[in-house]
Image: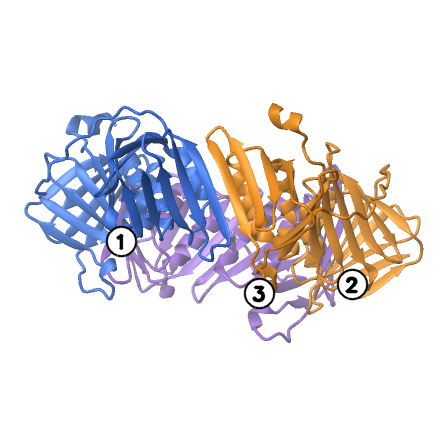
Chain colours: A orange, B purple, C blue
Amino acid sequence: MLELRLVQGSLLKKVLEAIKDLVTDANFDCSTSGFSLQAMDSSHVALVALLLRSDGFEHFRCDRSLSMGMNLNHVSKLLKCASNDDIITIKADDDADTVTFMFESPRQDKIADFEMKLMDIKSEHLGIPEAEYQSIVKMPSQEFARICKDLSSIGDTVVISVTKEGVKFSTRGDIGSANIVCRQNSTVDKPEDATTIQMKEPVSLTFALRYMNSFTKATPLSSSVSISMSSDLPVVVEYKIAEMGYLRYYLAPKIEDDEEQS
Amino acid sequence: MLELRLVQGSLLKKVLEAIKDLVTDANFDCSTSGFSLQAMDSSHVALVALLLRSDGFEHFRCDRSLSMGMNLNHVSKLLKCASNDDIITIKADDDADTVTFMFESPRQDKIADFEMKLMDIKSEHLGIPEAEYQSIVKMPSQEFARICKDLSSIGDTVVISVTKEGVKFSTRGDIGSANIVCRQNSTVDKPEDATTIQMKEPVSLTFALRYMNSFTKATPLSSSVSISMSSDLPVVVEYKIAEMGYLRYYLAPKIEDDEEQS
Amino acid sequence: MLELRLVQGSLLKKVLEAIKDLVTDANFDCSTSGFSLQAMDSSHVALVALLLRSDGFEHFRCDRSLSMGMNLNHVSKLLKCASNDDIITIKADDDADTVTFMFESPRQDKIADFEMKLMDIKSEHLGIPEAEYQSIVKMPSQEFARICKDLSSIGDTVVISVTKEGVKFSTRGDIGSANIVCRQNSTVDKPEDATTIQMKEPVSLTFALRYMNSFTKATPLSSSVSISMSSDLPVVVEYKIAEMGYLRYYLAPKIEDDEEQS
């Protein structure tokens, strides 16, 4: 039997909004350690990885490991019926072919339950090796989202270049070219407003802005985002989920030839 | 001669927004007792009844009873030109074929008048007998609107079931099934937040969500809504209009066969 | 060399939003006296004139007069990348075929620069003679915008009539007719809320509402608007730009025959 009670139900709503545009159907994996998901986007270019650790739930019972296949648009529709301050409980029997989402209002005077059929989804779980990155940029998530959106009005790809001074986002399109530089500023009032750079080596990589804009749907989950880059690895765009885990997006850089074609 | 002066002009704006999607053309009936409307929706399934009592107007002159046929979309367009704090006056001569809406700003420095042609609309006035209902649910109007909207994302019909404990709204669709239970809670801080149930007999009836969603356009008119149900009568969804009257919607329940077909 | 530094960068964003729907391509003219633009709308009916005086800039360097042709939609796209509190600098070399817009965040931790190709646009600079107007109405810009929008839901043209008592806006359409009268009210708390009328002679002129609605895109630039009318001259709709200059729209009145046709 599975029973996961999450007091901060709005977290789950935000998670679904952050992944449903990228992934249509996916397995949610549940084990004693937590609730997780790993899925490629429909064009098999980006990878999404979610982890919500069991100790972040008010109640977490998972008698045996379970993989529950769901259509994320359907889950998103159900979760839209939850108010932001609702407590959400996910329930399933072992070997069941349905899952139940229960929403309780804080005053317990409104209780909703939604039963949904599970799907059989084949998926391979990729082992993602821990890696050392040449550069890691941590910056306000809203600023990163704003920059990706702004550059999209000019070009299709972004070059992200990290130096000691800061991180530069560049693009080029029919109407002109753009460079946006964010400088390190660890001395701000709020730590979440800081832009910090951990750099072993300067790095400059090119990415499709379309994917970056999809990733920034996770902005409501965290006030800061970290971007980990190495020239021979996919970039990792990570949003921490308060005390519970993370939502990570992986995307391979475009190589020179791609750039010329686009 | 007719001259009705309504200080709280925003009321009239809200009334039009609450009925214009359901009814295209209708007669506004004016007599010494008040300003009223009764109309079937265009598919002849639901009935709308409005009453604004004469004593709720700052000035109410109606020399002889008058029935004024209007296109409600046109009236809504005119009323959108009134600011929310404008005073609205409705004027017509006896036997006139036009009606004039006048909007005065509170400071009297902006005065607008709109003249509109009246229409000849044939309509029967249905006598609606006073009835005793098996169950009457009073609940916050925003909560009722939210529930109808939420269930619409899953199914087409709603089963409303009343018991002593509370009222249950259920639906079923391709992606799954949903039950939302609201419990009695008369002990809340604000009376308009209360959910109360007057029950002589438990009742469970099925309705088309499409109509329920149309009715909830009246939500801005009142902070609470009452839903009166008997197994052999149309449901009455009533929004009180502060100290002046009401807007009521009547809708026949779906019978079993309907349910199976839908 | 050209280098114009504008601390209140949001002004430039508002200017572009106010003219880009009316004018597609235009020359920005820069001289020691300031930064200006004069352009006909694409159907050659309305004229837009912008002036930002050099003393309103924090830094204004213009070694020789320059006329820079730009696509206003492109400029608008670039300026949307500037935050409202950004400082904007416009830079160009003499004889350059590009212009650079630079946006600095107030804390200087984010610096963006956008380079855009200039265009070769042929345009005649019309000399607009100073004129004496029969009537000048000054009124809150939001109210003027609201009136133009409201009347557009009823008719296509507006008759603006000025008398000593006030200014009347009238229209007529399929659903009826409308008159909105704004009275002089210089005794209000805030001077920008005042409606004042300077009248030498009563005047009544007819204009296409479509253009008036385009002009009101400038509403965010100023809390009041002035409308200068004479029976033999184009109307001037002017929005002052705080201590720096103005944005003016010129539009010829419709003559009687036009009215009948429309």
Q: Identify the residue at image location x=74%, y=54%.
A: A246
Q: Mark 2: which amino acid?
A: Gly
- Secondary structure of the residue carrying tag 3 is loop
**Disc 2 packing (10 Å; few <14; some 14–19; many ≥20):** some
Residue C234, above or below C146 = above
Is residue B254 in sight in this rendering?
Answer: no
Q: Which mark is residue B214?
A: none
Contact, CB < 8 Å: mark 2 with mark 1? no
- Secondary structure of the residue carrying tag 1 is loop
Residue C78, above or below B232 = above
- Residues behind callouts 2 and 3 on a single chain: yes
Q: Which mark is residue C242?
A: 1
Q: Mark 3: which amino acid?
A: Lys
**Disc 3 packing (10 Å; few <14; some 14–19; many ≥20):** few
State the residue in front, B159 or A168: A168
Q: Chain of mark 3?
A: A
State the residue in front, A136 or C206: A136
Q: Mark 1: which amino acid?
A: Ala
Q: Chain of mark 2?
A: A
Q: Position of residue B60 (x, y in %)?
A: 31, 61
Residue A111, above or below A162 = below
Mark 3 lies on residue: A190
Of labels 3 and 1, the one closer to you:
3
